[in-house]
Image (cartoon, grey):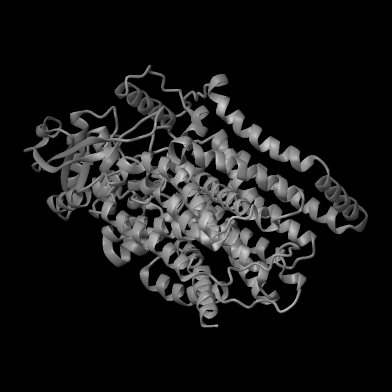
């Protein structure tokens, strides 16, 4: 009896701890977004609201109130499976926590310090730094510090648009809102450490989903496989939006699975929280709207079948996704305008899915058509269609495998950002000794990217598992897999078809981390468990089954570690925080900074505003020394001290004595286009300044 009680306690702990990160994220985003929209995102009101909302979310999301008998309101779909983790070995729960804890410790030790704007992680940090200190958007240009508008000055930079007289950050606000909490607690270092913490939460949430869908005994293996993939190791050392989005996705799917065994009221509360978690992915990543489209259809299916959990699921999903869209169009409009070629079709697709879902509900609820549709589905499940679905799954993967033989994906630049990307790709090609073609996107290699990061055995296991699950679902079996399967297959197919990212690695691996790699690893673990059960059914006992299971895990794990081994212990982007702190100290108060060199302006314009608290502008490409001297005079006339900034002493020496204000020598991620990453490159950054005398 004591052993059984201990098992139940271990099961409850594993159930709760794996969804708690998603619930806390939901609570934080839910209270922070309205404050940000109101221009009042400050630690006092945010934390004061977060504490009770988080308590309510944890109470409703973590408590378990199993139904005593059959209650249709609490069912997600008819199933003979009682659901829940039940009695779980403490070794299982302890192993999941140990993997998560070890991953967190490693990532904290290897955490990067990307705060100088070169790519997205630093852009997110600077976005969050501004929110930490000011709590509102947009960012003022502060042109008064330069004597007013001047034709020689501009204020925009990479990831920070000049829009209607202000500076508007690129990207959605979800991740910066989360990073701001770390900034309030521990400054810039606190923001940087949010990345390892979010990465550990991803590993924990994935283990929870594996425990629910495959079995608790396989949760440690799932956690280990994901934790050791190069994309997870790499991404959770940097502030990237895929991390909180993945926590919300995995946590939302796990919460929705838990609904299956709850009594009516508790089930509806958890369904709403699950929908809210899945919807808030849009606040973190605008393309998350694509990922959650199957959830809308699933909610409609629940409504059509008379399950009252469908309504709260749909409400939570609409509220979360709606909040993300409001933030995007109110605070990130230039970013969405830049994405219009992909965003507008996505919005049309979303509307079409909503209409189709509504039509499905009406047809299924109307007895005349509903009975016929159900009869058709039952007949299809008994026929050859399930076998055809399994074969089609394998054929799709084969099509992605032969894609490089029949297609070369290119993108002709049509705007300044695309031209900059094309130039960047040419630079990487030149360094790697390749033919120069900046229009190449290398998207045809997307399946081979997966092979690099999870290995051939895991990919084969995943393909078999996906085919087997497709067959089962078509036959009306394993209904708990319906939504996770739909979301994973839909998202993975979209990502493999069109990754939509600059194709250098490990950078491009972040797109696979969004759900493709965790999803395929989930199918991989499912296949391993299926094989182990087959061995058991042949009459073999634990002495044979356990070694077989261990061999299967090792077969998938070894290729993963072979790819990630070098990067696992390679530190990159170090010492940037100290370098920027030194720059801010060197500039001092009361300065207006004018950057006259393009790369330096790109890297430091927002750094100076957000972290140094000083107004900063850049000279336009047509500016001449006479224009700079005119600006110098206007800065003095405004009662401030001008500082001229560049990358070399010769660029600033004509305006005053050149002084080196920042010198950074570190390592950065290497960049490959047609093979897995495995090295780092050197990075040297210098900043020189001059303080012109008063005219």
Q: Residue at x 33, y 61 (%)?
A: 132
- The reply to whether residue 123 is in sight is yes
In the picture as drawn, the residue positioned furthest to the bottom comes out as 1
Vertical order, 455 against 415 (above or below): below
Quadrant holding the N terminus: bottom right
Q: Nearer the viewer, residue 5 or 676?
A: 5
Quadrant holding the C terminus: top left
Image side of residue 381 versus residue 591, left or right: right
Residue 657 place in picture, x, y as percent: 6, 38
Q: Residue at x 23, y 33 (%)?
A: 597
Image side of residue 160 versus residue 586, left or right: right
Q: Nearer the viewer, residue 74 or 157?
A: 74
In the picture as drawn, the residue positioned furthest to the right comes out as 368
Residue 148 place in picture, x, y as percent: 29, 45
Q: Nearer the viewer, residue 559 or 357?
A: 559
Q: Which quadrant holds residue 627?
A: top left
Image side of residue 591 versus residue 425, left or right: left
- The reply to whether residue 39 is in sight is no
Residue 538 place in picture, x, y as percent: 64, 52
Vertical order, 424 against 271 (above or below): above
Image side of residue 203 versus residue 11, left or right: left
Residue 235 place in picture, x, y as percent: 38, 47
Q: Nearer the viewer, residue 394 or 91?
A: 91
In the picture as drawn, the residue positioned furthest to the top comes out as 435
């Amino acid at each position: 009896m004591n052993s059984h009680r201990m098992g139940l306690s271990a099961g409850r702990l594993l159930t709760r701890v794996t969804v708690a990160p998603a619930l806390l994220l939901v609570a934080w985003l839910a209270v922070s977004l309205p404050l940000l929209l109101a221009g009042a995102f400050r630690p006092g009101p945010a934390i004061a609201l977060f504490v009770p909302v988080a308590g309510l979310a944890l109470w409703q999301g973590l408590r378990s109130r199993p139904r005593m008998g059959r209650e249709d309101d609490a069912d997600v779909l008819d199933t003979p499976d009682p659901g829940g983790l039940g009695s779980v070995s403490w070794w299982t729960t302890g192993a999941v926590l140990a993997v998560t804890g070890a991953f967190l410790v490693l990532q904290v030790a290897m955490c990067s310090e990307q705060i100088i704007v070169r790519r997205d992680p630093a852009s997110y940090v600077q976005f969050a730094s501004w929110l930490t200190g000011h709590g509102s958007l947009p960012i003022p240009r502060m042109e008064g510090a330069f004597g007013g508008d001047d034709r020689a000055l501009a204020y925009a930079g990479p990831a920070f648009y000049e829009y209607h007289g202000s500076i508007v950050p690129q990207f959605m606000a979800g991740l910066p809102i989360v990073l701001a909490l770390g900034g309030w607690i521990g400054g810039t270092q606190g923001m940087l450490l949010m990345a390892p913490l979010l990465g550990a939460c991803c590993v924990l949430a994935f283990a929870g989903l594996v425990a629910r869908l495959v079995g608790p005994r396989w949760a440690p293996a799932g956690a280990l496989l994901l934790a050791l993939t190069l994309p997870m190791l790499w991404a959770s050392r940097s502030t990237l939006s895929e991390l909180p989005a993945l926590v919300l996705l995995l946590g939302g799917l796990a919460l929705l699975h838990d609904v299956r065994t709850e009594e009516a009221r508790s089930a509806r509360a958890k369904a709403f929280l699950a929908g809210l978690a899945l919807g808030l992915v849009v606040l973190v990543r605008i393309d998350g709207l694509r990922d959650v489209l199957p959830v809308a259809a699933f909610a409609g299916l629940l409504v059509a079948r008379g399950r009252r959990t469908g309504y709260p699921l749909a409400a939570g999903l609409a509220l979360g996704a709606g909040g993300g869209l409001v933030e995007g169009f109110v605070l990130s409009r230039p970013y969405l305008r830049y994405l219009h070629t992909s965003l507008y079709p996505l919005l049309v697709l979303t509307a079409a899915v909503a209409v189709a879902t509504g039509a499905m509900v009406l047809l299924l609820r109307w007895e005349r058509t509903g009975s016929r549709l159900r009869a058709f589905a039952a007949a299809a499940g008994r026929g050859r269609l399930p076998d055809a679905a399994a074969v089609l799954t394998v054929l799709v993967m084969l099509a992605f495998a032969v894609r490089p033989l029949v297609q070369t994906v290119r993108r002709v630049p049509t705007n300044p950002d695309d031209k900059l990307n094309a130039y960047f790709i040419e630079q990487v090609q030149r360094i790697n000794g390749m033919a120069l073609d900046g229009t190449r996107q290398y998207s045809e290699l997307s399946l081979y990217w997966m092979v690099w990061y999870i290995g051939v055995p895991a990919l084969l296991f995943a393909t078999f598992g996906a085919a087997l699950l497709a067959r089962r679902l078509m036959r009306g079996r394993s209904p708990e897999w319906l939504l996770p399967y739909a979301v994973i297959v839909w998202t993975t197919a979209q990502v493999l078809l069109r990754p939509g990212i600059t194709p250098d690695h490990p950078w491009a691996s972040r797109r696979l981390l969004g759900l493709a790699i965790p999803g395929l690893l989930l199918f991989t673990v499912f296949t391993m468990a299926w094989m182990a059960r087959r061995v058991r059914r042949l009459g073999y006992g634990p002495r044979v089954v356990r070694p077989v299971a261990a061999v299967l895990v090792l077969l998938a794990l070894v290729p993963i570690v072979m790819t990630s081994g070098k990067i696992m212990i390679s530190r990159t982007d170090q010492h940037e925080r100290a370098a920027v702190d030194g720059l801010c100290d060197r500039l001092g108060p009361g300065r207006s900074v004018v950057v006259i060199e393009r790369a330096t302006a790109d890297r430091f314009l927002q750094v100076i505003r957000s972290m140094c608290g000083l107004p900063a502008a850049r000279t336009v490409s047509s500016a001449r020394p006479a224009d700079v001297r005119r600006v110098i005079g206007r800065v003095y006339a405004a009662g401030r001290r001008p500082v001229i900034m560049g990358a070399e002493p010769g660029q600033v020496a004509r305006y005053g004595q050149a002084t080196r204000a920042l010198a950074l020598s570190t390592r950065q991620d290497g960049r490959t286009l047609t093979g897995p990453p495995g090295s780092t490159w050197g990075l040297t950054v210098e900043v020189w300044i001059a303080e012109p005398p008063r005219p």
